[in-house]
Amino acid sequence: MTLADGTGDAEYLAALGHGLDEVFARPRPAVVFYVAGADPYEGDRLGRLAVSVGGLMERDAMVLGRCRRAGIPVAVSMGGGYAPDLDAIAAIHANTVREASAWARVACADDVARR
């Protein structure tokens, strides 16, 4: 699916939800490699989308949450970040790390509970 220039939070997250539904309808992957790019951010010079910092936080929660519920391990990588507002880029990446860390704590607690 191609998103138009200037696509904001609602349309971006709806497209992501649809894409996640398609991926998780297929045979279960052994691992998910998640490139959590900052390029969709509204201030990014190259990404051309208009997703807010909050929208990107919701993106991370959607992707990592779906993987957690499916019991699939995730490798997270940061990417992008071509906005002149370096504080926003740092916040986007820090939010991803916080979400992934929370996901990892839940996964570890689940592993301990199963033992």
Image (cartoon, helix red, strand yellow):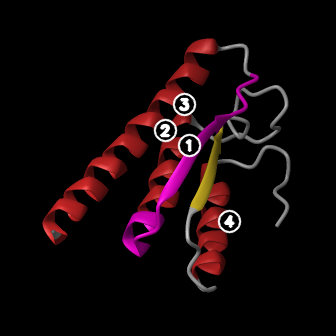
Q: What amino acid is at disc 2?
A: Thr
The residue sitting at 65% across, 14% down in the picture is: 85
Of callouts 3 and 1, which one flags the residue occurring earlier in the amino acid sequence? 1
Image position, residue 47 (x, y; %) = 80, 37
Which image quadrant is residue 44 in?
top right
Which is nearer the eye, 14 or 110?
110
Question: Circle 3 sits on which residue?
Answer: 92
Which image quadrant is residue 17 in?
bottom right
Q: Looking at the image, do the residues carrying marks 3 and 1 touch, with CB atoms under 8 Å apart?
A: yes
Q: What amino acid is at disc 4?
A: Ala
User: Which stretch is magenta?
Assistant: 66-82
Q: Looking at the image, do the residues carrying marks 3 and 2 touch, with CB atoms under 8 Å apart?
A: yes
How packed mark 2 is, by other alpha carbons closer than 10 Å (few <14, some 14-19, many 20 or more), is: many
Left or right of 30, for residue 11: right
User: Mark 3 to mark 2: distance in Å?
Assistant: 6 Å
Question: Circle 4 sits on which residue?
Answer: 15
Q: What amino acid is at disc 3?
A: Ile
Q: Single out the residue that lies furthest toward the front.
A: 115
Question: Circle 2 sits on which residue?
Answer: 96
How packed mark 3 is, by other alpha carbons closer than 10 Å (few <14, some 14-19, many 20 or more), is: many
User: Mark 3 to mark 1: distance in Å?
Assistant: 7 Å
The residue sitting at 61% across, 40% down in the picture is: 77
User: Is residue 26 located in the magenta-colored stretch of the structure?
Assistant: no
Q: Which mark is residue 56?
A: 1
Image position, residue 10 (x, y; %) = 60, 56
Left or right of 2, for residue 36: left
How packed mark 4 is, by other alpha carbons closer than 10 Å (few <14, some 14-19, many 20 or more), is: some
User: Mark 2 to mark 4: distance in Å?
Assistant: 19 Å
